[in-house]
Every structure is written in structure tokens, then in C-alpha cells.
Image (cartoon, grey):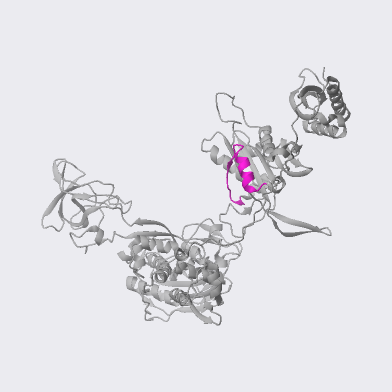
Amino acid sequence: MQFPESWLRSFVNPAVSTDELAHKLTMAGLEVEEVTPAAPAFSGIVVAHIQTVEPHPNADKLRVCRVDDGSGNLLQIVCGAPNAEAGIKVPLARVGAELPGGMKIGVAKMRGVESSGMLCSARELGLSQDHAGLMVLAADTPVGADLRSVLDLDDTLFTLKMTPNRADCLSILGVAREVAALSGCDLSIPSVQSVPVTLNDTLPVDVQAPDLCGRFAGRVIRGVNARAQTPDWIRTRLERAGQRSVSALVDISNYVMLELGRPTHVFDLKRIQSGLTVRWAQPGETLELLNGQVVTLDPSVGIIAAGAVVESMAGIMGGEATAVTLDTTDIYLEAAFWWPEAIMGRARRFKFSSEASHRFERGVDFDNIPEHIERMTRLIIDICGGQVGPINDTIINLPCREPVSMRLERCHRVLGVPVPRAEVERIFASLGLSFQVEAGNVFVVQPPSYRFDLFIEEDLIEEVARVYGFERIPDVAPMARADMRVQPEVLRGPHALRAAVAALDYQEVVNFSFVEEAWERDYAGNADPIRLLNPIASQLAVMRSSLIGGLLANIVHNANRKQTRVRVFELGRVFTRNVQVTDGDLTVAGVDQPQRLAGAAWGPAFDEQWGLPVRKVDFFDVKNDVQCLLGARGADLVCVPDTHPAFHPGRCARLELDGATIGWLGELHPQWAQELELSQAPVVFEVDVQAISRARFPEPVELSRQPVVVRDLAVWVKTGTSYQSMVDTLANARRTHANLAVLKDIRLFDVWRDAASDAAEKSMALRFWFQSPSATLDEATIEQCVELLLNSLVAEHGARLRA
């Protein structure tokens, strides 16, 4: 929320500087995100009156102006602006003036004619982007006056970063309440005087949805002049609050919204054929909004209709059919209380946002609607004129504000500071909270109609802390018994796992848990993901059941920015339905939120360098990373060929550890790689965090002093035989035969297929390391061990020795 400091100080004016005021607001929970001047720095700019304008003798596009700057002497200034004409008042940079950017003005000759100054456009002064001509000032602006004083340019713009619970501060009045409570200054609220009713005209309103609209008020005003000029003071405040001036009626509506936090809507009365009906939309109804967008409505969207014609989206945006124009003469002014639950997320569903929906979905004051209508009516009558009808105020279903109790002793315990009872009473009174103190120093507070964030005891304790001052709460370390805890040697927490993956040359990313529905369908095979009731964006509408989609989006993002090598990982939660089977019936018993660890590698296997040839990352590179991540348990990792929706059918494996499936590893499916426009398919893994969080307990083993014996064994096996199955067979043989206890390690170092042979077999060469803990191994023992290993391969896989 952006607003000028001068507007805020018209409500409450504490004797503090701009920086001190910003600090007070920030420390009270209303974070001041930015403080900027209303206009850039410049000096020596005054109001000047153009007396005469003559053509330049040596240039067609230049003119020579005689200008009165209030000094008593007319100045000669050469100007090229197309709108320079006698009689207008414009900004003048005198000789010696300094413009934004540091440019200084001096006496200059332009095509042989001396010019003693510079007539300025709004763009040259940094006040707007308008550079079509000179900035024309009001006719009653005093000549010679300093422009900064005339236009109140020494103002400051505050930008607040509001939390969603403080909807009451989305207005100048709301922020002023906070400043008054923090500073102890008096709050000056604009007086609201009832406008005399001169008409008996009313518009019938039928509220058919009490869960949509709790209160609806409005009045008829006839004979307004919609072409009236918006006063400069309103237009200036709107512009400095980030609102552009449209027309007097629209500007007044926006002004009241920013001043009091009350969104209103102005209907063109002549375009309403009958009374208004407030209801939920019917399936298939359409509406053209004020922004030109045509939306198709559904029963979850509230509307205001005139007969069978939908006129506006309730609490969100008006429709084009009844919008006011410069030719409007009769209007219907509407203000209502819309239930926040009925407004939440509706605008985002249609891919737009509005100031009204931003406020209504957080909660708007439901008690002062008639007073706010009177304030807006007064502005309309003063600016546009007209005849006023009575306010028709219909109360249907207002929130029930239950009192909230706060124990003073509990407040002391939570804050750690014994705030005196009198101070608490002062704080609640300064915040406008009515309260009673019951036995035992229990404060019973009645939340006001504009506060939608006071429900429990802790909310009131927070109010005390905010106004009392967080800076006044001392930093006292808690006193507690220090128990020494043994660090578990076999458990690895999330931080240790992140450090291990980062050490493997991966960079961590943190993605949204909300993902696109197509990701769940394509990458996880999930046709029915968990949907969000109120998504932050229309495309992020479901909860993820896999981390793969986010990593692929990270790779695409980097590839589009000319990165050639990407290695990313994420450790986070996924969300799946907890489906239970009872007597053959499926029931959903909540949502499971397991943690997963996923990584993706794309591009070269190593950074480009002179010592290594460039090679694309492949399945086995990432498999090695997973094994390294598992540490000593990496040797027990089993890759079982399988299929997964995200991966290449022939380059995908289900990861098993100790007989249980822990995740997946594979190369991205060519179809998805093509859709993502990636030149190479990334290799991705995803494992369950709980399954890999337990490491193998370290066991000390005496180092053998005996020499190691190395033997190679090459065998022919069927083409479909996997290395993993052979290793499992050899490991089983080692457990079965006592003589093979000296076998320390096995490695595959060569795979060869005879291209000239039609046999469906391949040669696999294995290397074995043998070592005895107590004696040097002789040749007979080694040969016996190799024979046992070969026999096990022959028995299980039909292997034969390669000559």
C-alpha cells in the first residue's frame, strides 16, 4: 500500500521525523518497505506567466517567449514546446536552477537568440512521463512562487508491506489509528455531515444470499455533473497513492476507499432496468467487467444482477453494462459488507486482481457503512452537484464478534516483561478496543467491527507487545537445565543430507509445493492430485506428489538463459492421499506428507576443461552420485529395470535398498524432453528421505598386513544378464563358502559383444581382490576361490569361461 506522508499527517501528526515515523510503523508490524520522495530533487523552479509568444527568426520549430517570473522584469526565453502560448502559467527554471539529474541552467543562445532560463515539461522535472509540451499550471497559481511549495512536492511516499491479517490498515484511517496509538497523539477523523435528503427515490434491493452479503446499503443521486473536474487535492493524493485519475465520480470512489478503507461502486442508474438482486451466479452466466475482460461465472461467484442481467461481480469488480460515463446524470451509490470467505480467490481464478477484492477477502468494516456513504455523498455533491435520496440500509447477516479474554499474568509470561495493568489499559484504549477488567486481572475485549484479526488470547498479547514496543522487551537468555545429548551416529538429518548432495556438485533449490496439474499427470502419473481451494495462481492449482516437475522447470529456466550445465537438487515434502482399504472399501484418511530428496543433472558430466573430453551426463553418472550419497550402504543399492511416467522406458530403474523400494532413477522421457525444448534429456533421481536417513553403524576392523592378490575373470553370459544379478550371486557364494571369506571386493571393468557373432551373449570381465587377515595367500587357495566363484556364475546364469 502506497500513500503520501502528508495525507497521513492530516489525520495524525506526531512530532517525529519521517524516518522515525517509518521506524515506529515497522516495529509495530506495519513494515515500511520503501520511503521515497514525491518528486526528485530540483531547485530554482518557479511559477511563470507567459506574456507573449513570437516566432523564432532562425528556426521554424522554436518560439521566443516573454515571461513574467515575479521579479518585475520580463525574461526572454526560447522554447520549442508546441503548447507554449500567451496567458498560461508554467514552471520556469531560472538561471542557476538545478534540474533532476544535476543539470544546471544558464544563459544560452539558441540559433542566435539569447535565452535566460528554461520553460519545463513535467517529464523534465521528473513529475510524470508527459513530455508532449509544457506543464500547464492552474490559472490562479501565484507568479514567482516556488514550484515545490505550490505543488507540495516536498512530500514523502510511504510503501507499506501489509500482512494479510491487517486489512484494517489498508486505508489512511487505519494507519492513522496505529500512529495515534503508538505516539499518543490525537486522531483527527474527517467530519461526516449528513447531506440533506431532497429526493424520495430509492432502488429496491433483494439480497438472496446471506452467506455472500451481510449488509447492503445504497442511495440514489440524480442530476450529477460527471464532467466536473476532480479537485487538484484529490487528484494529487490519488496519484501519489498509485491511482490514476479517471473521472470525478470514479476518483471520489477511489478516494474514499483509500481514505476510509471502504470499497464502493457507482452504478449508472439509467442503465438499471429494475431493482438489484444479490445472489450467487448461475452456471454459464457471463459478465463484461470494467477492465474489458469477459468472464464466465459459476455458482461459487457472487454477483449483483438487475433482473436477468448480471451487472457486477460482488465485492470484486463492476460490470461495463452499468458503468458511469461522462454523460451519466443519475447514479446509484452502493456500499456493502461481503463475507471474506465469499470473495477469497475469486479474482485470482479469473487471472486479475482488484483493490476491492484485495480488501473484502481480508475483511472490511461492517458497522460504519452509512457514515462512509455520507462521506462519499458529500464529496459528490460538493464536486458534481445533484439531488440526494435517502440511504437504504439492509442488514442481513453480520459477523458475531465474540469477546476475547486476556489474562494479565499470561501476558507477562509470554512477553517476559511485567507490563503494568495501567499500561495495558492505556494500550487497549489507544487502539480503540473497548474492554472490561474482571477478577484476576482478566481483560475482556470486544473486537471492533474493523478488526478481523482478534480471536484468541495471543492476538491481544500481540497488540500489547506491538504498542508497548518490541524494542523495550529485553534480550534475556532462557534459563534451562543443560542436558548433554549423544549425537546419533547412524542418523542423518536433512541438513546432513543437503550437505552430502551439495558436495556432489549439486546446487539446492526450493520450489513451490503448489504445481501445475500437467506436471502431476505427466511426471508422476497422478490423474487425481490434491487440489487447492484457494490457489495463489491459477496454474499452481494442485499439491505436488513428486519433486521432479520443479527440478525440470529449474533446468528449463537455466537453459533458456544460456546455461550449458545444470545440476540441482531439492529436499522437501510431497503430498499424497492416505488411502486405506477396509473390507474391500477404499477410504481416504487424510494426507501423507513424506519428505523426498530429488536431483537432476543436465549437460556435460564435468565442467569443460583441457584435461577431460566433453561428455554428456548419463544414467551411470547419477547412479554413482546416489551411491555416494548412501555412503557405506551404497554398495547395497539395487537398480531394478522398471517403467515410470517421467522416464525413458529403457533407461529407468526402481531403486531398492535392503529389499524395499526407496525411489527412482532414470533419464527423462524423450517426449517430455521435446516438449520442454531441451537438447538433451536430464537424468533425474528421487528417493525417500526416511529410507536414506539411517547410515550403517561403523565397525572397527583390524587392518591386514598381508598382501592383496588381484585376479580377473571374463565370462560369457546371456545378453539380458545384469551386472547386479551377477554381483548378488557372487555375494551369496561368499556367504555360503567359508573359503571365500578372503574375497574383499568385486568390480566390473569390461563389457564386450562380438559384432560378428549372432549369439545373444556378451562378455563381462570381473576383477577380484583377495586378502587374508593372517597369512599370505598361496596360488592354490586363490585358484580354489576363483573356481568357486566361476561355478556359482555357471550354476545361476549359465556362464562359460571366455578363452
**Left or right of residue 396, residue 190 in this image:** left
The x, y position of residue 711, in whole percent, is: 78, 22
115 or 480: which is nearer to us? Answer: 480
The magenta region covers 492-515
70 or 149: which is nearer to us? Answer: 149
Residue 716 in which image quadrant: top right
The x, y position of residue 462, in whole percent, is: 51, 68
The x, y position of residue 345, in whole percent, is: 56, 61
Query: Residue 512 lies in magenta, yes or no?
Result: yes
**Left or right of residue 613, residue 383 in this image:** left
Quarter of the N terminus within the rendering: bottom left
Residue 159 in which image quadrant: bottom left
226 or 242: which is nearer to us? Answer: 242
Quarter of the C terminus within the rendering: top right
Identity of the residue furthest to the left in this view = 73
Q: Is residue 130 above or below residue 502?
A: below
Query: Residue 116 lies in magenta, yes or no?
Result: no
Q: Is residue 295 above or below residue 78?
A: below
Residue 482 seen from this side: yes
Q: Is residue 528 above or below residue 756?
A: below
473 or 46: which is nearer to us? Answer: 473
- Figure label count: 0
The x, y position of residue 362, in whole percent, is: 52, 66
Residue 306 seen from this side: no
Residue 35 in which image quadrant: bottom left
